[in-house]
Image: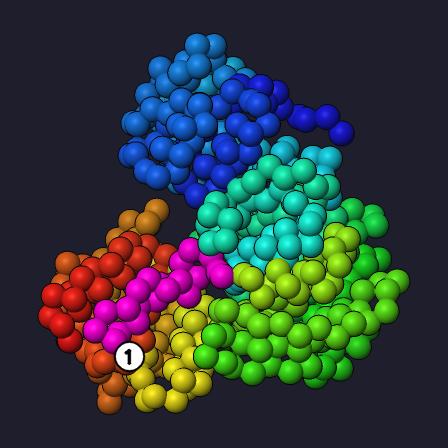
């Protein structure tokens, strides 16, 4: 199939964003003319400039002529860029097609074996694991990841192999733009209800995604997540090939879905997780594999199974894929180690949904218990979006109660306007009375609050999808200054 759009000259509005910058890199590597704009300079912007991409800081209609000739297509992130942006208005006035990032990704994947990773939680980590495993197996996939892959030091790559591995984002239904060869669904839990309005519409988008799979392709679902498994059952009824992964118990619960990867044993270690699994892909004998993950948590074990199955279906040798999982050092902002000061270790994580916060704090708890030194877990959490905070205030309170103490910042509104009378107190007021909890509306005081709670040996986690990531460095600086 030929491209629907002429990609010879592409202008990208918001080019410094994690998703946009990666696709710009792939376009530049393929020899296209790429220009763009963003509101501020950043590391991704500077990297792209070294590749010959012309980028303007600030938005203006004349940015459309950065390469001399006007672009053949303009790309934007509809969620982040307002529709009255002067570059978008200029493009429409000139009759230049304006497309979404997901449209561009679909074009770039055309002609490749498409490995798409979807789900409410774990997309970035699972995509990154799959890429690392496939690279170890010599497949050199192209990829586009929402976060930065630590090992590769990048979030996108134009590979020489047949496969293109990418996240499939459901938040605005853009995943329905793709035609996967292998589609993985890690889990399904109602989210982004500001877009979908109700849980039923959210569930349906994953059904529709399954219907996009190529005729000879596979849907791969986590059987430990009931909604993902039920998506698989419905797909089976429509004649789609479905494979599952998870525990033996989960496999017994859904016997009509072949268990392609089964957890046989997992043990928390000081490094992370020691894992033993059995993989049985269609047309191949089952194999037992052992490997060690450097990132703790049962959710990471499940993500590794998805990587094995999807990498195996793409033609990778299972033993080599497992070696790649052992080498996987994580993704930026996914249980990312940021440093140690005064015997206090600081990690940063992007978790912004109660299930994700529960997973990362459970993993942290398992880590300190495996070390056996009596360390505590201190959470510094920033809620993301007013709508999500109001929807899940009780669940956030329960999740944060897994820490020994917590500092809770006020809500990071992102694209939403403040809601009168709503602050993070709707979370902290529901947390256990015997737990040390600080509600801190002043961002500049948060690092000092965290330091006031810690003891030598403790693990601190900055958690959230907003500006809270900036606090990890500040906490380390405060610890160094105070010599706790």
Q: Position of residue 349 (x, y in %)?
A: 39, 63
Q: Position of residue 439 (x, y in %)?
A: 20, 71
Pick whichever, 110 or 271, lies toward us. 271
The answer to whether residue 17 is above or below residue 87 is: below
Classed neighbour count for the residue bearing mark 1: other residues with Cα under 10 Å, few (<14), some (14–19), many (≥20): many
The answer to whether residue 2 is above or below residue 135 is: above
| Quadrant that contains the C terminus | bottom left
Residue 209: in magenta span: no
Based on the displayed image, in which of its 4 quarters is residue 218 positioned?
A: bottom right
For the record, the magenta segment spans 329-349
Pick whichever, 175 or 453, lies toward us. 453
Provide the secondary structure element on which disc 1 rests: loop
Based on the displayed image, in which of its 4 quarters is residue 233 positioned?
A: bottom right
- Asked if residue 390 can be seen in this view, the reply is no
The answer to whether residue 217 is above or below residue 101 is: below
Horizontal side of residue 332 vs 289, given as left or right: left
């Amino acid at each position: 199939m030929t491209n629907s759009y002429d990609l010879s000259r592409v202008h990208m509005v918001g080019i410094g964003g994690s998703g946009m910058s990666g696709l710009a890199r792939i376009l530049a590597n393929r020899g296209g003319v790429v220009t763009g704009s963003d509101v501020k300079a950043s590391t991704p912007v500077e990297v792209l400039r070294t590749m010959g991409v012309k980028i303007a800081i600030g938005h203006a209609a004349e940015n459309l002529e950065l390469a001399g000739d006007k672009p053949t297509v303009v790309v934007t992130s509809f969620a982040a860029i307002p529709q009255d942006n002067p570059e978008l208005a200029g493009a429409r006035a000139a009759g230049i097609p304006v497309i979404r990032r997901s449209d561009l990704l679909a074009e770039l994947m055309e002609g490749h074996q498409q490995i798409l990773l979807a789900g409410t939680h774990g997309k970035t980590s699972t995509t990154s694991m799959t890429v690392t495993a496939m690279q170890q197996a010599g497949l050199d996939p192209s990829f586009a990841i929402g976060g930065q892959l630590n090992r590769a030091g990048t979030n996108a790559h134009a590979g020489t192999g047949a496969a293109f591995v990418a996240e499939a984002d459901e938040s605005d239904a853009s995943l329905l733009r793709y035609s996967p060869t292998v589609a993985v669904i890690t889990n399904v839990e109602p989210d982004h209800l500001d877009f979908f309005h109700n849980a039923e519409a959210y569930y349906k988008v994953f059904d529709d995604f399954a219907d996009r799979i190529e005729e000879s392709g596979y849907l791969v679902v986590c059987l430990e997540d009931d909604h993902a498994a039920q998506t698989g059952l419905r797909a089976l009824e429509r004649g789609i090939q479905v494979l599952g992964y998870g525990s033996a118990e989960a496999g017994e619960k859904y016997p009509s879905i072949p268990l392609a990867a089964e957890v046989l044993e997992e043990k928390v270690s000081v490094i992370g997780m020691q894992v033993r699994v059995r993989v049985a892909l269609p047309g191949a004998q089952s194999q037992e594999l052992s490997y060690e993950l450097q990132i703790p948590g049962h959710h990471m074990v499940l993500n590794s199974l998805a990587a094995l199955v999807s990498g195996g279906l793409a033609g990778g040798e299972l033993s080599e894929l497992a070696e790649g999982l052992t080498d996987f050092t994580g993704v930026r902002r996914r249980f990312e180690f940021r440093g140690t000061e005064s015997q206090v270790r600081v990690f940063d994580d992007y978790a912004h949904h109660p299930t994700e916060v529960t997973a990362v704090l459970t993993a942290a708890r398992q880590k300190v218990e495996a070390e056996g030194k009596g360390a505590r877990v201190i959470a510094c959490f920033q809620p993301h979006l007013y709508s999500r905070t109001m929807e899940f205030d009780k669940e956030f309170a329960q999740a944060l109660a897994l820490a020994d103490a917590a500092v809770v910042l006020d809500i990071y509104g992102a694209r939403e306007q403040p809601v009168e009378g709503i602050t993070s107190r709707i979370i902290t007021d529901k947390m256990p009375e015997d737990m040390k909890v600080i509600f801190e509306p002043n961002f500049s005081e948060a690092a000092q609050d965290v330091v006031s709670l810690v003891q030598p040996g403790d693990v601190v986690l900055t958690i959230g999808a907003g500006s809270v990531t900036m606090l990890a460095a500040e906490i380390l600086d405060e610890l160094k200054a105070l010599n706790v």
